[in-house]
Image: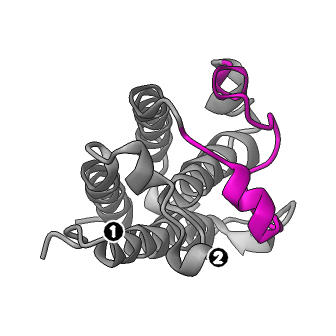
């Protein structure tokens, strides 16, 4: 298995796990804040998917993110540029997903765009280093493996934990 075959497989598994972890949550479960101060699942999910959208589409391909091309910012009444980094706890708490089926559609579209991009990357491309806004100098290997897969998986663990705090099943293991 090549590195890119592994990355594609890992991304598909992560996307499936993320979708499965949130698809049946109620509005109350999505917006439960641990200790009334922590981030709710709605914010964590939005931040996670928006980050992948920005990294894959905007940073790596110099394309407009799915969030903007499909008008999801307007559909959800959320900021067209923000993705959560640097937000205060109050700002994060104000990010609410009130249309979960719509957000699942946005997620699916981002995940399709990610897979299409990853399909075109060759192993020999991974060592290419570029200077990315907000990330600095990174190889493509670091951006895909770190920013997309590792970052995304850490937030999936966070979602599972917040579900567990609510008495719900977290990790499927």
Q: Which residue is mark 2?
A: 37
For marks 2 and 1 on the same chain, the one whose residue lies earlier in the sequence: 2
User: Mark 1 Cα within 10 Å, few/some/many (few <14, many 20+)?
Assistant: many
Q: Is residue 110 left or right of residue 86?
A: left
SS for callout 1: helix
Q: Which residues are magenta?
A: 71-97
Q: Which mark is residue 128?
A: none
Measured along the vertical axis of the image, is residue 149 above or below residue 119? below
Q: Nearer the viewer, residue 106 or 144?
A: 106
Q: Is residue 89 one of those drawn in magenta? A: yes
SS for callout 2: loop
**Count of marks, rendered view:** 2
Q: Residue at x 54, y 63 (%)?
A: 40
The location of residue 30, given as percent across then percent down, is 44, 53
Q: Residue at x 69, y 46 (%)?
A: 54
Q: Is residue 96 one of those drawn in magenta? A: yes
Q: Is residue 107 left or right of residue 61?
A: left
**What colour scheme was applied to this rendering of the protein?**
one colour
Q: Is residue 136 left or right of residue 95?
A: right
Q: Nearer the viewer, residue 155 or 39?
A: 39
The location of residue 64, given as percent across then percent down, is 74, 29
Q: Residue at x 26, y 44 (%)?
A: 24
Q: Report the residue that reaches farthest toward the left.
A: 173
Q: Which residue is mark 1?
A: 163
Dots 2, 1 in contact, CB < 8 A: no
The location of residue 82, given as percent across then percent down, is 80, 48
User: Mark 2 Cα within 10 Å, few/some/many (few <14, many 20+)?
Assistant: few
Q: Residue at x 73, y 41 (%)?
A: 58
Residue 132's image quarter? bottom right
Q: Is residue 130 visible?
A: no
């Amino acid at each position: 298995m090549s590195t890119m075959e592994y990355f594609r497989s890992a991304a598909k598994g992560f996307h499936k796990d993320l979708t499965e972890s949130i698809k049946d949550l109620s509005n109350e479960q999505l917006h439960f804040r641990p200790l009334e101060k922590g981030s709710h699942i709605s914010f964590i999910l939005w931040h996670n998917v928006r980050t992948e959208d920005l990294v894959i589409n905007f940073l790596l391909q110099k394309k407009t993110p799915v969030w903007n091309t499909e008008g999801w910012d307007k559909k959800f009444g959320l900021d067209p540029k923000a993705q959560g980094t640097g937000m205060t706890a109050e700002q994060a708490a104000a990010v609410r997903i009130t249309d979960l089926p719509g957000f699942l559609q946005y997620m699916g579209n981002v995940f399709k765009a990610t897979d299409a991009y990853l399909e075109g990357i060759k192993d020999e491309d991974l060592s290419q280093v570029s200077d990315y806004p907000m990330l600095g100098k990174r190889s493509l290997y670091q951006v895909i493996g770190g920013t997309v897969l590792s970052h995304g998986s850490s937030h999936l663990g966070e979602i599972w934990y917040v579900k567990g705090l609510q008495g719900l099943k977290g990790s499927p293991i």
